Amino acid sequence: MGSGTSTQHHFAFQNAEKAFKAAVLIQRWYRRYMARLEMRRHCTWSIFQSIEYAGQQDQVKLHNFFSYLVDHFTPNNHNERDFLNRMFTEERSPQDSEMENCRDYESIEVPDSYTGPRLSFPLLPDHATALVEAFRVKQRLHARYVLNLLYEARKHLVQLPNINRVSTCYSEEITVCGDLHGQLDDLIFIFYKNGLPSPERAYVFNGDFVDRGKDSVEILMVLFAFMLVYPKEFHLNRGNHEDHMVNLRYGFTKEVMHKYKTHGKKILKLLQDVFCWLPLATLVDEKVLILHGGVSDMTDLEFLAKLDRHKIVSTMRCKTRKEHKKQAEEKGKANQTSSAGTPSPWFLPQSHSLPTSPLRPSTQKAHRAGRSSSVPCGVPLDPKELSHRVRHSVDLELERCRQQAGFPVIKEKEEPLPSASEADPEAEGRREPTQEEWRQVVDILWSDPMAQEGCKANTIRGGGCYFGPNVTERLLQKYNLQFLIRSHECKPEGYEFCHSRKVLTIFSASNYYEVGSNRGAYVKLGPALTPHIVQFQANKATHTLTMRQRISRVGESALRALREKLFAHSSDLLVEFKKHDKDKTGLITLSDWAAAVESVLHLGLPWRMLRPQLVSSLTDNKLEYKSWLKNLAKEQFSHENIQSSLLEALYRNRSNLETIFRIIDSDHSGFISLDEFRQTWKLFSSHMNIDVTDDCICDLARSIDFNKDGHIDINEFLEAFRLVEQSCSKGYASDC
Amino acid sequence: MADDRDREGTEIAVAEFHKKIKEAFEVFDHESNNTVDVREIGTIIRSLGCCPSEGELHDLIAEVEEEEPTGYIRFEKFLPVMTEVLLERRYRPIPEDILHRAFEVLDPAKRGFLSKEELIKYMTEVGERFSQEEMEEMLSAAIDPESNSIHYKDYITMMVVDEN
């Protein structure tokens, strides 16, 4: 008996031990698998973020391009002059008297066949709710109602102060939402989950309602509708994307013109004004400050409260003549090309919080003597002379453009220059913000918090600053505040606390980069204003995916974007690779590959971690770089007849090109003439140092399908080279 | 001669390891101050190719922690320890067949599968137990909803393919 049990025990013990070991083994293996997934998730996130922010740096490149034009380009003939006109002519911001003209929406007929929602004013809560429902089932609001609603919204916004003060006495709860970026599904989900706005349920939407997503128009309509219905409980803050210049680049302009072919331009014009009237911040119970970006060490709430926010049409603006002159004097550099007399074009992003050197190489450009042959003016001259001559003629041109456009020049003398086309006296001139006003607003719309103490220029975004915990602390103390709520940055969990929980980032656009990339969140402020976060992810599909599937899907998307970026820099990469291959073996080590790629792309990504997904075949643990680059190219384009360096250049500059095209297409028709396209490309390529012959450009133009004689459909052009993201073309159907 | 070459080879390997370790570390260095939260160390170590058990991981953390644990691990302490780990090829990953045999230990009848309940029992009650979250995540991918069981051979194959 005794021995029997002990044997049984022995076996049992052995079995238990074996099972234990087996379990440990499986657990160990599984945990490693999950860790690798986690790492991949982080890398994917880095890819998306770095590409997104690198895109924002493109604004700077655009600036350089136009600086270059101003410095170097002499219009040779009438055509070129007109072309420049189109680029440099300011579209006036609508004056108050002109706003009355917008009542002409009343003359817009709504056909009986229209089955969408019909609005009547003053709006009732039911109307707003019905609007949400209508959009949920994909109906579209007629242009007449859009304009009407915008007009009414503007009337309301004009009365609001810059810093909206809100009290929680009346409503029991207040919910703050962050960036929506045209993702209507998220807004609908928030209302579904949290409840529709009501006198007991206050809402604050913290900017960036538009751009990138496909339903920016609908989001605006819903937000403005509720704002009109519950003016005391429903509040909106301006974000950096509530800006017509930014909209040109990031998709909102395109969306409006697609959805409203006939009246789109009118809508955009009215919107431009409405955006400037959005409040800059909201203050809850004098304790919680809600604004879109952040603060700087110079942020002055009293100053912000007093300025005329309507003057800040866009956070991308030009220096006034006076300022330019002052700066030039301050610099006192002999070799400064933009001298006192030259105003920079109106759309140049001029961030005064940027350090002067690395991003403003205009001084170096002046000395590119060897470039005169590629400058389209045909006369080889001594560079200084050339500069001077060019500057002078461009000056004249710009002056003429401005006069023609009725743009009241900031004058040395008193009387304004009469405009040829308008009887409307612009005696006041358009009021320009001062540098300080502009800077204060840019800081609160563009800044990001950082972990380190201090305050430094936000070079990644090209505007605003990075502010540290001490800056936050000082501000909170100065104005006796509890904490700050801001948005502006996408977070994997939809929210993030920092600066010892004194700053809360709230971001409400879920799946922002890709399905499964991140959650959205909103925050409810309860009694004593304690924050309570609610997270969500609006896409049903993500719930059914396992973490593994979600991560791999998002990962694939990120890698695709990254491969495209690599392709766009093929020539530079080749040069770098060759440097590591002194013996001309055609092979480089993976370590060299990583170093080379980072030195060209400057994305700060963990290349060694990403390597297995970017480089598949190796010879002796080394990379055959030429064939690797060839493979990248093969993935990207189908038009083999087009010179590949040209294509590469297109890819690299696509968002700039698109923006430039849209600027040229000032009537938002969606078409530019073939000639304009060729000229744009010529200028752009000479500036970007791309060696392209005229024939090549013609070939390029010919390879695109023209549906009208001599006109290029911008979208067709970009699509032809798969430069437009698929989702945009799917999203819209045309009508009103 | 051979020694010199060996040494050089090791130096190159060490340099390469240093770069790899730095990269992985930086992914989690959110404040850009050369520290990471101690809770992320496991992820970092595992993503560098190692497959330690929880126990081994705790020992490793003890080596790299400050004398008075702050909750953060500094890169200066992490780098030499991790370099040694990589040079010694410690905590090697588990080959497929060994993993398969481990599953078979838990499936003595050699049916080729484990029921959902059995898997839960083993993973959450035996060995270095799973948390609720870990268990749920594993179940979501592993369990065949029709039979409510995990066919471990297929499961292993799928996971391995996934990794590559």
Image: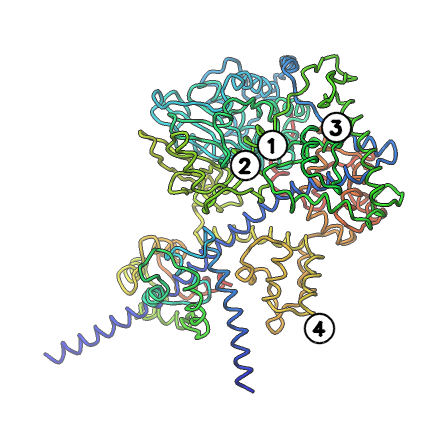
Residue A660: image location, x then y, percent: 71, 37
Q: Chain of mark 3?
A: A
- Give amino acid for label 1: Thr
Q: Quick one: A680 or B134, which is closer to the camera? A: A680
Instruction: Identify the mark at residue A89; answer none if there is no mark.
Output: 3
Residue B33: image location, x then y, percent: 45, 54
At mark 4, the secondary structure is loop
At mark 3, the secondary structure is loop
As measured in the structure, the alpha-carbon distance from the residue carrying label 2 to the one carrying label 4 is: 48 Å
Earlier in the chain: of badge 3 and badge 2, it is 3
- Give amino acid for label 3: Thr
Which residue position holds label 1? A315
Q: Chain of mark 2?
A: A
Crowding around mark 2 (Cα neighbors within 10 Å: few <14, some 14 to 19, many 20+) is: many
- Give amino acid for label 4: Asp
Earlier in the chain: of badge 2 and badge 4, it is 2
Earlier in the chain: of badge 4 and badge 3, it is 3
As measured in the structure, the alpha-carbon distance from the residue carrying label 2 to the one carrying label 1 is: 9 Å
